[in-house]
Each structure stands twice: as C-alpha cells, then as structure tokens.
Image (cartoon, helix red, strand yellow):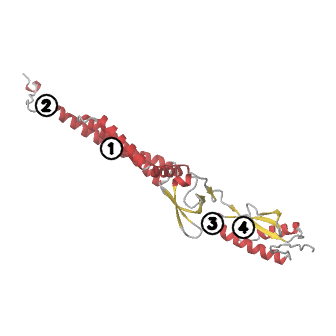
C-alpha cells in the first residue's frame, strides 16, 4: 500500500478553525493584491493626467483618490472573507460621508470650483485676471482658493467658489491689452488734425505695440471740450506703465502742435433787470 495516498488525519481540535484560517489567508492575499493594484492605479492615473498637462497638484490628488478607492474595495472584500458584515460597514461609511459633506458643503463647493479651474484652465499662473471684483497677477491656483498679487503689491486670496460664480476677465490670454484713454481739446480745434497728432503720438510712444495698431477716435461732445479716445495696446505686464507714457506723450504732442487742452468751463448768463 502506498502510504503517500492515505489521507492525513486532521485533529478534531483544528477542524472548527480551518474555515477561519482559510478565510484569513484569502483575506491577506486579497489585501496584498489590492495594495499592489492601488499603487498601479496611482501611477497609471498620474501618467494619464500628466500626459494631458493637468496641473500637478490636481493630478496627484486625483491619482490619490484612485489609489484609495482601489485599496478601500480591497479592504472591504478582505473583511467579507473573514466573516465581517460589510453591508452595514458600507452603509455606515456612506452615512458618515454624507454627514461630512453637509458639514463642509461650503468648503466642498470651493474645492469643486478649484478642480474645475485646474481642469478647464480659464486662467493659469502668471495671467493677469479680474475675478470677484479684484484684479491682479495669478500667483497660485489651489484646490480651495486662488492667490493674486494686486498692482499695489497686495496679496489677494479669492475662494474658488466666488471666482467661478462670477465672470472672469483674463487680460493675458491674447497677449495684448488695450487702454481707452480720454483726451479733451478745445471747441474750434481742427478735429482731423488732432486725430492725426494723437495717432502719430501713439505710434511713437514707448511700450505701445505696433500690432495690434493703436488708434484714436472722436468720442463725443463734452461740456467743455471735444472728447477723443486714444486706444493703444501693450503687453499685459506693461499696461500701467504704457498708460503713463501715453498720457505724457499726448500732453507734449498737443502742446507742441499748439492745440488747446481746455479747463472745465461754466457759462453764467446774467438776467436783465
């Protein structure tokens, strides 16, 4: 008789523990495999998002969500193999998530807006924007807030929910920003000559772009002056300095041409006695 073919007797004291040992071993295997797959999911999602040029902070955050989702599924599956009732556990986690979501709904709204901003990129770091009533250079785009540096060198922190709930003006996107500078000349001035003088002045002023070309138009009839509008373009970062240069150049050009820049005038009529 072949002794190796004989069944190995199992002590009666171990028989009740066999399902527990098998379940624990299976749960351990599931957890280890889940851990490996969670690392793989993190790397895969991170590579995909980087390939689409998604912001690095958002890429890592979404990759982390994918990793922990796979790991949570592995843990729940492993617990079910050792006899833990996972249905009630999932329900408890869902209830806790709902309660946390309701308590943090304001912060979650800012977070969701931050994710949408990083995905769709209405502005990026280095852009000059106007959002929520503030204008400045974008220094940081976080998941909850956007940080601007104002022209006065102040730091402005705008919650992403407020920025996305109103219109956003991106002054940098097209590479040039136009100013509308009002110019008043005296009634009786040769308007065609004034337009030529101001237009030539714009073309020769420092920081004014040649393309798009600057222009000047007749804005209307003011109370004391004929109002013109000078429309020069500049690079977004040169915008304040360009306006300063244009105003000085126009002032000197009009003086050199003998064109009067009038004061505000009030005409008083005296009633006859």
Which residue corresponds to mark 1?
36
From the viewer's perspective, is the residue at label 1 or at label 2 nearer? 2
The answer to whether residue 53 shows anywhere in this view is no
Mark 2 surroundings: few (<14), some (14-19) or many (≥20) residues within 10 A: few
Instruction: State the quadrant of the N terminus.
Output: top left
**Percent of width and height locating residue 21:** 18, 35
Tell me which numbered mark, 1 or 2, is placed earlier along the sequence: 2
**Image quadrant where residue 135 sits:** bottom right
Mark 1 surroundings: few (<14), some (14-19) or many (≥20) residues within 10 A: some
Tell me which numbered mark, 4 or 2, is placed earlier along the sequence: 2
Which residue corresponds to mark 3?
237
From the viewer's perspective, is the residue at label 1 or at label 4 nearer? 4
Instruction: State the quadrant of the C terminus.
Output: bottom right
How much space separates mark 1 and mark 2, taking CA atoms?
A: 32 Å
Tell me which numbered mark, 4 or 3, is placed earlier along the sequence: 4
**Percent of width and height locating residue 100:** 39, 47
Which secondary structure lies at badge 1? helix
**Percent of width and height locating residue 130:** 61, 59
Looking at this view, is 42 or 191 the one in front?
A: 191
Is 111 rendered above or below residue 8?
below
Looking at this view, is 201 or 51 the one in front?
A: 201
How much space separates mark 1 and mark 4, taking CA atoms?
A: 59 Å
Which residue corresponds to mark 4?
208
How much space separates mark 4 and mark 3, taking CA atoms?
A: 12 Å
Which secondary structure lies at badge 3? helix
Which residue corresponds to mark 2?
16
């Amino acid at each position: 008789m072949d002794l190796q073919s004989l069944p190995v007797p199992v002590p009666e004291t171990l028989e009740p523990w066999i399902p527990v040992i098998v379940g624990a071993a299976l749960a351990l295997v599931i957890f280890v495999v889940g851990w490996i797959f969670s690392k793989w999911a993190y790397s895969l999602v991170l590579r995909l998002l980087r390939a689409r040029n998604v912001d690095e902070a958002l890429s890592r955050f979404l990759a982390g969500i994918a990793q922990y989702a796979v790991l949570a599924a592995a843990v729940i599956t492993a617990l079910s193999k050792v006899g833990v009732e996972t249905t009630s556990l999932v329900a408890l986690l869902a209830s806790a998530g709902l309660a946390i979501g309701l308590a943090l709904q304001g912060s979650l709204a800012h977070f969701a807006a931050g994710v949408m901003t990083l995905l769709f990129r209405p502005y990026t770091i280095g852009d000059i924007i106007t959002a929520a009533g503030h204008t400045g250079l974008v220094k940081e785009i976080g998941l909850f807030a956007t940080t601007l540096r104002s022209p006065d060198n102040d730091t402005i922190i705008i919650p992403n929910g407020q920025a996305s709930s109103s219109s956003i003006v991106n002054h940098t996107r097209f590479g040039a920003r136009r100013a509308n500078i009002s110019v008043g000349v005296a009634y009786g001035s040769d308007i065609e000559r004034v337009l030529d003088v101001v237009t030539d002045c714009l073309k020769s002023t420092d920081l004014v772009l040649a393309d798009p070309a600057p222009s000047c138009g007749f804005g209307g009839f003011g109370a004391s002056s004929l109002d013109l509008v000078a429309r020069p373009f500049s690079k977004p970062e040169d915008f304040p300095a360009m306006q300063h240069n244009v105003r000085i150049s126009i002032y000197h050009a009009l003086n050199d041409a003998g064109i009067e820049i009038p004061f505000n005038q009030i005409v008083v009529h005296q009633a006859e006695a």
